[in-house]
C-alpha cells in the first residue's frame, strides 16, 4: 500500500472573502491510497489526499509540468544529467526517470480519486450532507478527468482504471485503451463532475467553473471549435476572472489566487513547489539547471513581442539569464493549471478555425492578451495569419507553464517548428519500469 505525506495546506473547508483569503495550513499527516472513508472527516481527509497527489513532485509539482516546457523550444539545460536533455532533443528513452515519476504520480492521483468516487458516493445517509457528498465526489471526478487528460496528451491511449486498488499489481493486464477511448473517459468524468460541483469561484478547488475551463481545453484538443468557444465564453463572461495588468500581477510580490487564476495548486513554506530550485540561480538558492535559451530571451525582451512579459527572465550575478516565474523563498510558488489568459487564447483559436465572420472575434481575443502585455494590436487578417499569431502568443504567454510542447503536437506543428523528424516522437515512451511490472503493457511505436 503506497503512503505519502500529503500537502497539509489544502484545507477543504475554506472560506473565501471578496479579496480571496489564503488557505490556512494544517499539520502534516499521512494519507494512504485506500484511505478508509466512513464519515465527513474521513471523506475530507481522503479528498485532501487526492489534491496532495495532484500537487506531488511527480505531477504538477515538477515532473509532469517539466515535460510540457522542456520539450518545447524555450528552454535550455545547463546541467549534466543527460535524461533532461532527452526532452530538449526529443529523444526520450523509456528508462527516463522523469517520465516514470510522472506516470506513477498521475496514476496515484487517479487511484485516490477512484477511492473517493467509490466510497464517498456509497456513504449512507446522515454521514455527511448531500450537498457536501456531491461536491467531494465531483471534485474527485474533475481531478481524475485532468489526470487522464494529461496521460492522453503525453502517452496516447492508456489503461483506464476506474476502481480503487490496493497496489500497482492489481492493475496488471489491463489493456491500453485507444486515444479516442481515453479522451472519452475524460469527457465522461467532466460530465459527471459538472452537475455535482457548486457554481462558485474557488482558485484552489474544483468547481463547475473549473470544469468549464477544462472542457474548453478538452474541446480545443478535439478540434471541436464550437464547443471550445462556448465553454471559454462561460469563463470570459464571468466577472470573477480577468486579465490582470501588468502581466506580472498574477505572480509577482508573492501574490496567489488572483482573478487571473481559474485553477491553481497551493504550496506553502513547509510543503514546497519543486520548480523554484530548478529555475533560480545559485545566489538565490537554486541550481538554474533549467534556463531560458537565447532564442526565447531575444523574443521576450523584444518590446514588440514580449512587452511587459520580460519580467519572466532576469540576470544572475554572472550575467546569465534565468526564468523568474517561480521565485519565492521558501518555494511556495503556485502551479498555474488554468489561467483566464488561456481561455482567451482558446476562444481566439476556436474562432479563427471557424473562419469567416468569427475572425474579427478571434483577433479581438488575441489582442486582449496582447494589450495586457503592453503590446500593440496584432493586424492578422486571414485564418492562417491569425492561427500563427495565436501560436506565437501562446509561446510567450505560457513560456514556463506546461503548454508549448503539447500545443505544437496537437496542432501538428511539432515537425516544422521543432524539426522533429520522427513522427513517433510526438508521444513519449511508456516507462520501462512500468513494462517490467506489467508485461502486457504495450509500448508506443518507435521505442
Image: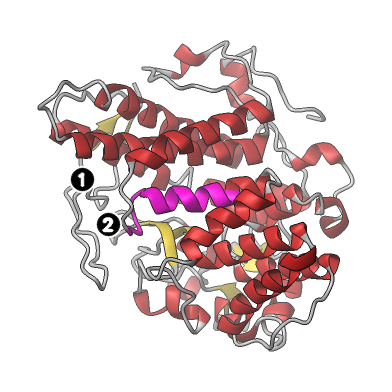
Q: Quadrant of residue 376?
A: bottom right
Residue 385 x %, y %? 83, 70
Q: Quadrant of residue 109?
A: top left
Quadrant where the N terminus is found in the figure: top left
Residue 59 x %, y %? 48, 44
Between 128 and 402, the one nearer to me in the picture? 128
Magenta run includes residue 403:
no
Marker disc for residue 390: none
What is the image's colouring?
secondary structure
Label 2 residue SS: loop
Residue drawn at x 65%, y 76% is 364
User: Where is mark 1, residue-wise?
Assistant: 28
Between 276 and 215, the one nearer to me in the picture? 215
Label 1 residue SS: loop
Residue drawn at x 63%, y 56% is 403
**Would you say the residues marked 2 and 1 are in contact, meaning their CB atoms lie under 8 Å apart?**
yes
Residue drawn at x 85%, y 40% is 423
Between 436 and 173, the one nearer to me in the picture? 173
User: Where is mark 2, residue-wise?
Assistant: 270
Residue drawn at x 37%, y 70% is 258
Above or below for 163 versus 445: above
Q: Quadrant of residue 407?
A: bottom right
Q: Which residues are magenta?
A: 201-217
Q: Residues within 10 Å of mark 2 (few under 14, many from 20)?
A: some
Amino acid at each position: 500500500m503506497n503512503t505519502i505525506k500529503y500537502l497539509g495546506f489544502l484545507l477543504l473547508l475554506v472560506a473565501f472573502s471578496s479579496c480571496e483569503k489564503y488557505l490556512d495550513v494544517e499539520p502534516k499527516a499521512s494519507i494512504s491510497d485506500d484511505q478508509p472513508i466512513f464519515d465527513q472527516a474521513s471523506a475530507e481527509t481522503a479528498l485532501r489526499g487526492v489534491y496532495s497527489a495532484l500537487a506531488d513532485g511527480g505531477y504538477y509539482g515538477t515532473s509532469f509540468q517539466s515535460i510540457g516546457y522542456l520539450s518545447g523550444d524555450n528552454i535550455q539545460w545547463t546541467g549534466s544529467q543527460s535524461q533532461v536533455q532527452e526532452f530538449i532533443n526529443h529523444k526520450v528513452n523509456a528508462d527516463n526517470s522523469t517520465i516514470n515519476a510522472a506516470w506513477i504520480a498521475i496514476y496515484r492521483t487517479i487511484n485516490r480519486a477512484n477511492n473517493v468516487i467509490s466510497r464517498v458516493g456509497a456513504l449512507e445517509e446522515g454521514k455527511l450532507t448531500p450537498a457536501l457528498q456531491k461536491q467531494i465526489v465531483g471534485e474527485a471526478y474533475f481531478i481524475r478527468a485532468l489526470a487522464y487528460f494529461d496521460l492522453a496528451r503525453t502517452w496516447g491511449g492508456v489503461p483506464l482504471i476506474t476502481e480503487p486498488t490496493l497496489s500497482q499489481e492489481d492493475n496488471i493486464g489491463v489493456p491500453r485503451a485507444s486515444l479516442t477511448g481515453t479522451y472519452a473517459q475524460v469527457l465522461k468524468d467532466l460530465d459527471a463532475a459538472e452537475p455535482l460541483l457548486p457554481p462558485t469561484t474557488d482558485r484552489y478547488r474544483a468547481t463547475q467553473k473549473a470544469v468549464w475551463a477544462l472542457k474548453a481545453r478538452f474541446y480545443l484538443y478535439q478540434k471541436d471549435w464550437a464547443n471550445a468557444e462556448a465553454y471559454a465564453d462561460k469563463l470570459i463572461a464571468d466577472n470573477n476572472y480577468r486579465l490582470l495588468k501588468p502581466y506580472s500581477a498574477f505572480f509577482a510580490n508573492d501574490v496567489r489566487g488572483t482573478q487571473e487564476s481559474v485553477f491553481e495548486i497551493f504550496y506553502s513554506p513547509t510543503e514546497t513547489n519543486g520548480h523554484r530550485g530548478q529555475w533560480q540561480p545559485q545566489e538565490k538558492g537554486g541550481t538554474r539547471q533549467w534556463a531560458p535559451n537565447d532564442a526565447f530571451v531575444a523574443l521576450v525582451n523584444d518590446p514588440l513581442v514580449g512587452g511587459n512579459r520580460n519580467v519572466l527572465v532576469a540576470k544572475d550575478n554572472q550575467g546569465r539569464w534565468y526564468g523568474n516565474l517561480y521565485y519565492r523563498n521558501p518555494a511556495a510558488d503556485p502551479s498555474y493549471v488554468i489561467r483566464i489568459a488561456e481561455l482567451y487564447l482558446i476562444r481566439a483559436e476556436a474562432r479563427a478555425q471557424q473562419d469567416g465572420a468569427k475572425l474579427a472575434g478571434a483577433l479581438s481575443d488575441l489582442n486582449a492578451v496582447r494589450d495586457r502585455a503592453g503590446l500593440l494590436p496584432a493586424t492578422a487578417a486571414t485564418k492562417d495569419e491569425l492561427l500563427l499569431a495565436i501560436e506565437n502568443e501562446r509561446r510567450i504567454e505560457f513560456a514556463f507553464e506546461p503548454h508549448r510542447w503539447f500545443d505544437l503536437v496537437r496542432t501538428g506543428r511539432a515537425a516544422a517548428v521543432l524539426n522533429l523528424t520522427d513522427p513517433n516522437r510526438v508521444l513519449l515512451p511508456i516507462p520501462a519500469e512500468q513494462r517490467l511490472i506489467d508485461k502486457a503493457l504495450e509500448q508506443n511505436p518507435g521505442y
